[in-house]
Image: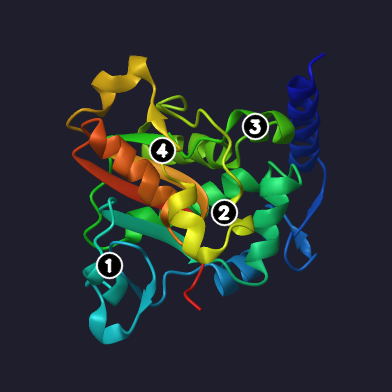
Amino acid sequence: MSEFVRRWLGAAVRAGAGAVLPSACALCGGDADAPVCTSCARQFVHGDGARCRCCANPLGAADAGHLCGACLAEVPSYDATVAAADYASPLDQLVLRLKFGGALALAPWCAGALARAVLAAPGFAPPELLCPVPLGPARLAERGYNQALEIARPLSKLLGIALYPALTVRPRDTPAQSSVAPGQRKKNMRHAFLVAPDMLTLVRGRHIGVVDDVMTSGHTLNALAATLKRFGAARVSNMVFARTPPH
């Protein structure tokens, strides 16, 4: 059995166990019939507050529906972003458990929160197809799964939008953005992505929805959007579970 298959099976078993055994809320530890109890969901995942319609950073109420100063100064390659929540305590620990701890049972819950945010986003045009942010080959083999794909699968079903897991590829492993100095993150993502050759006809002239767990600086999503547009995409919209607020 390969190392990749071993890790994937281990993650799947952990996810399945969480689905059939009595569960506790991943945030407060109280009894719950879902990964996160209703009380915590209401407290930490909500649609309150205006966000930039392009990058989903928080805005003042008077600026609702507009672009933030950063997007006005340098227009990103993507056209819109919807985020379900802020990447802040305690949700950040939940995301880390999904991303690095094999807690795959959290992915459908994140997808549900994201689907509600997408459907509630004013003026958001639904994409024609979904694409998860791909992992590099070594990181995928090490982790055994792609957390963006694990969110994208149930999100596709909830929104009724076709998912193409192999639409884009990440042919080489780049250093994790969290390990790179902020000023070098854009450079780190240069030439990181490609559209799969057999998927080119799906991209041309289409509105692509890119799914990820967290959006921090936005450089990864911007690089992927730039690649999709270079290969003919008409529009690219990001759908992320959590957005890191600006510091």
| Closer to us: 162 or 196 | 196
Q: Quadrant of residue 195?
A: top left
- Crowdedness near tag 1: few (<14), some (14–19) or many (≥20) residues, C-alpha within 10 Å: some
The residue beneath circle 2 is 177
Mark 1 and mark 2: Cα distance apart in space: 20 Å
**For numbered disc 3, what is the local secondary structure?**
helix
Ranked by sequence position, the earlier of labels 3 and 4 is 3
Mark 2 and mark 3: Cα distance apart in space: 16 Å
Ranked by sequence position, the earlier of labels 4 and 1 is 1
Name the mark nearer the viewer: 2 or 4. 4
- Crowdedness near tag 4: few (<14), some (14–19) or many (≥20) residues, C-alpha within 10 Å: some
The residue beneath circle 4 is 191
Q: Total marks drawn?
A: 4
Residue 34, position in %: x, y?
67, 52
Left or right: where 128 falls relative to 131: left
Ranked by sequence position, the earlier of labels 2 and 3 is 3
| The N terminus lies in quadrant | top right
Mark 4 and mark 1: Cα distance apart in space: 22 Å
Q: Mark 3 is on which residue type? A: Leu
Residue 91, position in %: x, y?
63, 65
Ranked by sequence position, the earlier of labels 1 and 2 is 1
Mark 2 and mark 4: Cα distance apart in space: 15 Å
**For numbered disc 2, what is the local secondary structure?**
helix
| Closer to us: 195 or 122 | 195
The residue beneath circle 3 is 140
The residue beneath circle 1 is 71
Ranked by sequence position, the earlier of labels 1 and 3 is 1
